[in-house]
Amino acid sequence: MDLGLRGKMAVVTGGSSGIGLAAARVLLDEGMAVAICGRNAERLDAARQSLAPHGDVLAVQCDILEAGDVERLRRDVAGWQGRCDLLVNNAGQGRVSTFAETTDEAWSEELRLKFFSQIHTIRAFGPMLRQSGQGAIVAVNSLLAYQPEPHMVCTSAARAGVQNMLKSLAGEFAPDIRVNAVVVGLIESGQWERRFQAREDRGITRAEWLADLGREKNIPMKRLGRPEEVANAIAFLGSPASAFITGSQIEVSGGLSRHI
Ligand code: NDP
């Protein structure tokens, strides 16, 4: 299927690792120019170098929680391609803590991360997306939005709130900009790599650790997802191939959800 993305431009937040990096690669292979951002300059540069053979890439150091950084990202993109057709709001991470462990500061930090990682970029790139004629926003969200976990209480609550906000935006921005989400389960990427590196059993290999995790979490597909598998869903939702889909989401979880 031709997704109709050739010659268009995408911004992928958190494009220096995991799902964002895979999304940038897939979108470049579809013929888009892609701007990525992240906070760590070294990781960002390594990502830019790995993506360069796939097409036109711009890498901008930017903390999406800082409105000034996001404005600079917008200016760089405007100066580089003068357009933005797709915004992939992917940057972020989860927080492991129960209600008893979560301080007021942690709640504020988590709510700020989940909401403002959407709000700042949507505000900055909204006008360019509107001008595109096929503007689309794809948020990378978590299945926790629908299936909360007590050990990730504030992440789960914040994720649900973001899904709610995206639904409002889909109504407000239609028909100019479509707003959709991918809701992911467990995907092999930076955050699981960090938990593997911090494992207690130092004798266990990465493959064994991941296989144990898949079993422990009862994933029907019996493994974690790969970042490319999320990236493909992002590309579809961000493309004219899904032109009549807005206010919706695709679950990429290997069948992990229990709701209908
Ligand atoms: P990674 O840790 O591999 O990548 C996260 C990316 O986001 C990095 O590029 C990181 O770069 C960037 N980032 C984080 N915070 C900021 C910030 N404030 N400003 C700019 N960039 C930032 O994680 P994943 O690929 O797994 O995660 C992608 C998204 O998917 C996240 O929102 C995550 O919460 C979500 N998700 C992932 C799941 C999984 O199982 N992998 C499960 C559920 C949700 P840098 O640190 O240099 O800023």
Image: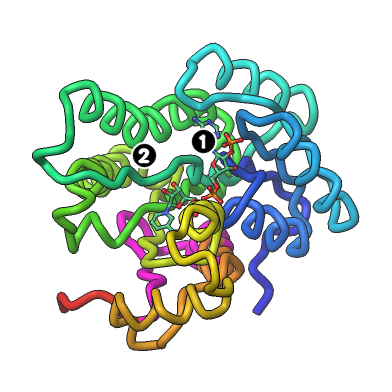
Spot occupied by residue 27 in the image (x, y as percentages of width and height) = 69, 58
Give the amino acid type for the residue marked by disc 1 in the picture: Arg
x 56%, y 49%: residue: 134
Q: Of residues 188 and 87, which is closer to you in this image?
A: 188
Which of the image's four quarters has the C terminus? Answer: bottom left
Find out whether residue 247 is within the magenta segment: yes
Mark-to-mark CA distance, 1 and 2: 8 Å
x 54%, y 37%: residue: 129
Circle 2: is it few (<14), some (14-19), or many (20+) Cα within 10 Å?
some
* Residue 174 occupies quadrant: top left
Q: Of residues 113 and 151, which is closer to you in this image?
A: 151
x 62%, y 57%: residue: 23
Magenta residues (range): 235-254
Spot occupied by residue 17 in the image (x, y as percentages of width and height) = 63, 49
Number of numbered discs visible in the structure rendering: 2
Q: Which residue is mark 2?
A: 173
